[in-house]
Image (tube, rainbow, N blue to C red):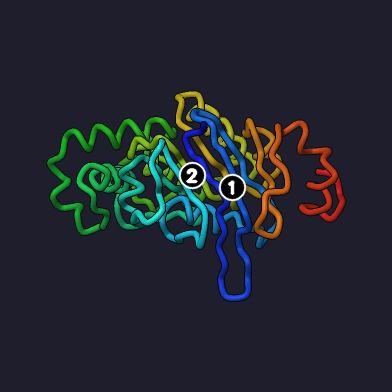
């Protein structure tokens, strides 16, 4: 049994069946990619993992406990952290301050920029934030504002904001979106280093270079349903994947 188990999950929005009988098992410590064309249901599925959506039917179990009906902050407290496609950062705060906020929130169960004032004397929180920034190679920029950073650095900053929460499961939504190739390759190397620490990771990504460089296993969604789950080397030549994902073209 995996650390995350999804069984027979369905989700409908009016006349649209966004997820249909989704079954998924994420092995502890693995790096698992979920891919598929636009509208395949990838983000909807992630939203069911973190409590932003509740499946109409089915179960989502994390580390042996059901996530269904829990609020997002309760799921976060349980050890599930999501890093969004668009960086959700506090632009006028320093990188260090940005990372201290979720560290404080993880400890005390709240998350809002107005909490910064009482954080200033928190030595333990500061040390955790500095460690997280160092892990994504941003330690030398810790006193610079978030708004002053490149897109690649903003993505790494949000990754640090996720890592400081000490997740058991890290969900990454398009972690290299909008990056130049050099930043993309640096992020690939960074995510490999994070995976090597034992954190379970689920990545949604459109860039196949990123997917095949990172994933140990890949699940392909099409029209809300998984059509194949396999090792990366087997996904590339799978005719179902080529037809559903790229209209028959080779990956």
Mark 2 Cα shell of 10 Å, populated few (<14), some (14-19), many (≥20): many
State whether residue 140 appears in this view: no
Residue, disc 1: 204
Which residue occupies 33% across, 42% down?
78
Please report contact status of discs 2 and 1: CB closer than 8 Å, yes or no.
yes
56 to 33, vertically: above or below? below
Q: Quadrant of residue 30?
A: top right
Q: Position of residue 166 (x, y in %)?
A: 34, 35
Q: Position of residue 2 (x, y in %)?
A: 51, 33
Mark 1 Cα shell of 10 Å, populated few (<14), some (14-19), many (≥20): many
Q: Position of residue 100 (x, y in %)?
A: 26, 43
Q: Secondary structure at mark 1?
A: strand
Which residue occupies 66% across, 50% down?
206
Residue, disc 2: 171
Q: In the visual, does 61 lie left or right of 91?
A: right
Q: In the visual, does 220 lie left or right of 63?
A: right
Q: Secondary structure at mark 2?
A: strand
């Amino acid at each position: 049994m995996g650390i995350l188990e999804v069984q027979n999950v369905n989700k409908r929005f009016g006349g649209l069946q966004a997820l249909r009988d989704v079954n998924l098992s994420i092995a502890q410590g693995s790096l698992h990619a979920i891919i598929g064309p636009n509208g395949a249901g990838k983000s909807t599925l992630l939203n069911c993992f973190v409590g932003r959506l509740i499946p109409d039917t089915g179960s989502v179990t994390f580390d042996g406990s059901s996530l269904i009906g829990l609020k997002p902050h309760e799921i976060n407290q349980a050890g599930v952290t999501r890093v969004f496609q668009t960086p959700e950062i506090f632009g006028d705060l320093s990188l260090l301050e940005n990372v201290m906020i979720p560290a404080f929130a993880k400890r005390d169960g709240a998350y809002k920029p107005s909490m910064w004032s009482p954080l200033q004397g928190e030595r333990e929180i500061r040390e955790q934030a500095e460690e997280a920034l160092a892990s994504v190679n941003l330690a030398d920029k810790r006193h610079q504002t978030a708004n002053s950073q490149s897109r690649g650095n903003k993505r790494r900053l949000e990754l640090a904001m996720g890592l400081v929460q000490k997740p058991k499961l890290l969900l990454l939504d398009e972690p290299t979106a909008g990056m130049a190739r050099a930043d993309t390759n640096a992020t690939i190397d960074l995510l490999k280093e994070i995976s090597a620490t034992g954190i379970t990771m689920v990545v949604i990504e459109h860039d196949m270079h990123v997917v095949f460089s990172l994933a140990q296993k890949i699940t392909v969604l099409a029209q809300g349903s998984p059509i194949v789950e396999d090792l990366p080397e087997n996904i590339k030549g799978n005719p179902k994947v080529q037809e559903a994902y790229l209209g028959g073209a080779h990956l």
